[in-house]
Image (cartoon, helix red, strand yellow):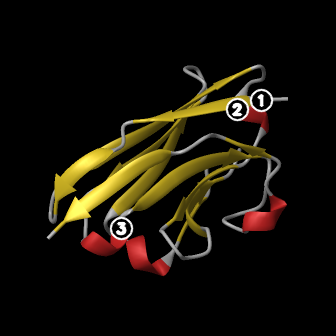
Amino acid sequence: QVQLVESGGGSVQAGGSLRLSCAASGSTIGAYNMAWFRQAPGKEREGVAGVGKYGGTVYNDSVKGRFTVSRDNNKNTLYLQMNDLKPDDTAMYYCAANGFGIVLRTYDYWGQGTQVTVSS
């Protein structure tokens, strides 16, 4: 079993950048596919970006070219670099482990989330 703790959220203006981190404990993330999801108020949780245990990545079309997902297995940490942020990116961001791609219901382990707020 793996425990996940997100950090790095905050408030930024449109066009700004943030880097989210997800620190894992209890197990090594090297064994898992990992992903980021987000949930805005009144909306369903959606997949943002995923990175497989062999390094392949997948992105939601809405973030392609702006967000980059990466993993450092030695630090047991997942990252999400977010550039050119838009107000529509405002949401609670969650990391997840042991699933497939960015398919929500396939993931077993979840963090508590970190809030990202983008003002226009």
Residue reaching furthest front?
A: 42
Of the pair 2 and 50, the residue shown nearer to us? 2
Percent across and percent down for residue 91 are 43, 61
Looking at the image, which residue is at 34% across and 43% down? 19
Looking at the image, which residue is at 26% across and 71% down? 87
Q: Amino acid at mark 1?
A: Val
How packed mark 3 is, by other alpha carbons closer than 10 Å (few <14, some 14-19, many 20 or more), is many
Disc with the residue nearer the chain's start (1 vs 2): 1
Quadrant of the snapshot with the N terminus: top right
Discs 3, 2 touching: Cβ within 8 Å: no
Q: Amino acid at mark 3?
A: Asp
Looking at the image, which residue is at 36% across and 43% down? 9
Looking at the image, which residue is at 35% across and 49% down? 81
Percent across and percent down for residue 32 are 76, 41
Above or below residue 42? Residue 90 is above
Q: Which residue is mark 3?
A: 89
For the residues marked 3 and 1, what is the alpha-carbon distance in whole angstroms?
A: 27 Å
Q: Which residue is mark 1?
A: 2
How packed mark 2 is, by other alpha carbons closer than 10 Å (few <14, some 14-19, many 20 or more), is many
Discs 1, 2 touching: Cβ within 8 Å: yes
- Number of numbered markers: 3
Quadrant of the snapshot with the C terminus: bottom left
Percent across and percent down for residue 116 are 36, 53
Percent across and percent down for residue 61 are 47, 80
Residue reaching furthest bottom?
A: 61
Q: Which residue is mark 2?
A: 29
